[in-house]
Image (spheres, grey):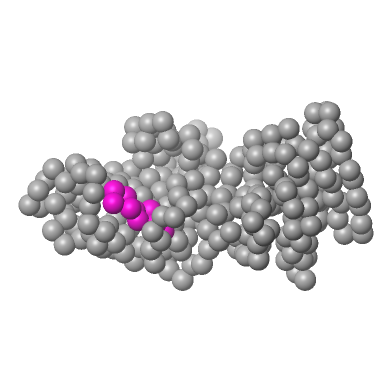
Amino acid sequence: MHRFGFPSIVIICACVFTVGMAMTAPAADRTITNVLPAVGCAEDWIIEDKIKLHTRETLFDHINGEAELYFPYGFEVLATATYHHKNNPSLAIVADVYMMGSPLDAFGIYSNYRKAGAATIMIGVEGFVSSSQLMFYQDRYFVRLQATGTTTLEQNTFLACGRAISQNLPHNTGGPPELEILRIPGVVPKSERYIARSLLGYSFFRRGIIADALSGDERMQVFVIPESSPEAARSAFDHYRSFLKASGQGVHLTETADHISLTAIDPLYGRILAEQTGRYVIGIIRMKDAQGAKRILDEIRKRLQGG
């Protein structure tokens, strides 16, 4: 019987690994490539050339100056195509579909571009349209359509292209469950943003969600920081407390059976109220109405505790 020696085993394993990679990578590419309409995205708008793919290594070639924004949100691959008007080739729509790390990451990128007062659309989980662009997110995909060769484009054209892409993405997906924490009275709808790195600019707050909040006529901001465990949340809370003490501001601490809270003056954000409860740190910055801020945090804590 012929026996394989060690070098032969290595060669066979390497071949199997190479074939496996060759089968896996194109499959992933086909998944996102098939999202973009292969012929046209709207009536009279036809594809130009072919669909292109960009990875982390080549994303700079497509959006130089913006690529770094996408990496903390688990960017995996971008599929992009250009559609031009068959009767006026100088008019074009650049359609980008980004595959991000999770639905929360896709929302995070989307929320970086969303502007207050933008015209919302019923495409994907949430989207908006203007005279020159359309954006939405769906599942873990962020979609961006941009007009070129003009500063204005008919809204119906954008909507037709957006719907054509949306129907090729995973269906029956709602928004990230993390956003439900802030679905409470006082928090301004559609003001939420997910920051994937250094919330508030502080490295000890690794990531979190921030939103505008109102108490009467007073505007504040509320934040929620999820951690992996109560111990990790307490560590982040203690780092914040130490930072506030080191800044020379007085820190008032209160502890109960289910949470610990502090009030202080943040050198960047004014009066603040922050709490650690379970594996979360929650808080209010730019606080003006202390009682209103406390009511909002009480409501958030109840949601986190399932009450």
Q: Is residue 110 above or below residue 67?
A: below
Q: Residue extending furthest front?
A: 217
Residue drawn at x 50%, y 50% as measured from the top left: 111
Magenta span of residues: 127-136
Is 243 in front, or is 36? 243
- Provide the major secondary structure of the magenta segment: strand
Q: Is residue 157 left or right of residue 18?
A: left
Percent position (x, y) of residue 303? 73, 66
Q: Please state the horizontal and vertical placement of residue 222, each as a whole percent of the image.
A: 67, 52
User: Could you say which is closer to the camera, residue 30 or residue 72?
Assistant: 72
Give how far across and how far down residue 64 sits, in percent. 38, 31
| Residue 132 among those drawn in magenta | yes
Q: Is 216 in the magenta? A: no
Q: Horizontally, is 58 left or right of 180 in the view?
A: left
Q: Is residue 73 visible?
A: yes
Residue name at image x 20 percent, y 60 percent: 42
Where is 167 relative to 283, above or below? Answer: below
Give the quadrant of residue 259. bottom right
